[in-house]
Amino acid sequence: HEKSSFRLTKTGRTLPTGDPSVHACGQSRETTKRFCQKMSAVEAEIIMKPLPLWVWVEYAAGALPRYIALNLLALTVHAIPAFRIILLNRSTLALHINMPAEFSFIPYAVAASDVARLALLAEHGGLYMDADFLVTKSLSPLRQLLTHYDTVTYEVGARIDVYIERNRMRP
């Protein structure tokens, strides 16, 4: 048998996985194996669950510029299935988050979208993009990064290069 081990995070104990006489929770080797397989399936489902992709689109009725419509089309091609696209503006924001009354006094769409972005990402997580952001490649690699890091940023003309480690103590 190979000698490997895993650490139980709540107890701090280390259990050897190669020792046939020691199993998690005192269960038989087969029960432990089935439990680990089920946990792996649950973790995979949680990890690959589509995240919300918030897109602020605030234009007068019928006045959506053609380039914005094309950007949104490209976004659907490159974001799905890794992300669930949610189009937002001042009138639809309340469907997703409760904003303070002062929000209605923000005169500019850009400032309103900045405030909404912070609130949505803090409450629901996911990814935020403005409608004029053109996506030309799959967002699946970005989705994979978001399974390991809380914050992923980018630089114009550079690869995604700043990651902030996920705090494992959060619920």
Image: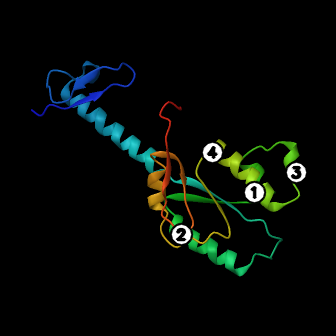
Tell me where residue 64 sits by quadrant.
bottom right
**In this rendering, would 108 be left or right of 169?**
right
Viewer-side residue, 63 vs 129: 129
Q: Are marks 1 and 4 in contact (CB under 8 Å)?
A: no
Measuring 63% from the left and 78% from the top, which residue is drawn there?
Answer: 70
**Distance from label 2 to label 4 (Cα)?**
29 Å
Mark 4 neighbour density, 10 Å: few (under 14) some (14–19) many (20 or more): few
Measuring 77% from the left and 43% from the top, which residue is drawn there?
Answer: 98
| Residue identified by numbered label 3 | 104
Earlier in the chain: of badge 2 and badge 1, it is 1
Q: Which mark is residue 113?
A: 1
The quarter in which the N terminus is drawn is top left
Q: Position of residue 4 (x, y in %)?
A: 19, 32
Name the mark nearer the viewer: 2 or 3: 2
Position of residue 47 relative to residue 23, above or below, is below
Mark 3 neighbour density, 10 Å: few (under 14) some (14–19) many (20 or more): few
Q: Residue flagged by tag 3: what amino acid is it?
A: Ser
Q: Position of residue 147 (x, y in %)?
A: 46, 47
Q: Position of residue 71 (x, y in %)?
A: 63, 74
**Distance from label 2 to label 1 (Cα)?**
24 Å
Q: Return the residue found at the far left.
A: 1
Measuring 51% from the left and 54% from the top, which residue is drawn there?
Answer: 50
**Distance from label 1 to label 3 (Cα)?**
12 Å
| Residue identified by numbered label 2 | 157
**Distance from label 2 to label 3 (Cα)?**
36 Å
Q: Which mark is residue 124?
A: 4
Count of numbered badges drawn on the protein: 4
Mark 2 neighbour density, 10 Å: few (under 14) some (14–19) many (20 or more): few
Measuring 87% from the left and 43% from the top, which residue is drawn there?
Answer: 101
Q: Residue flagged by tag 1: what amino acid is it?
A: Ser
Name the mark nearer the viewer: 2 or 4: 2
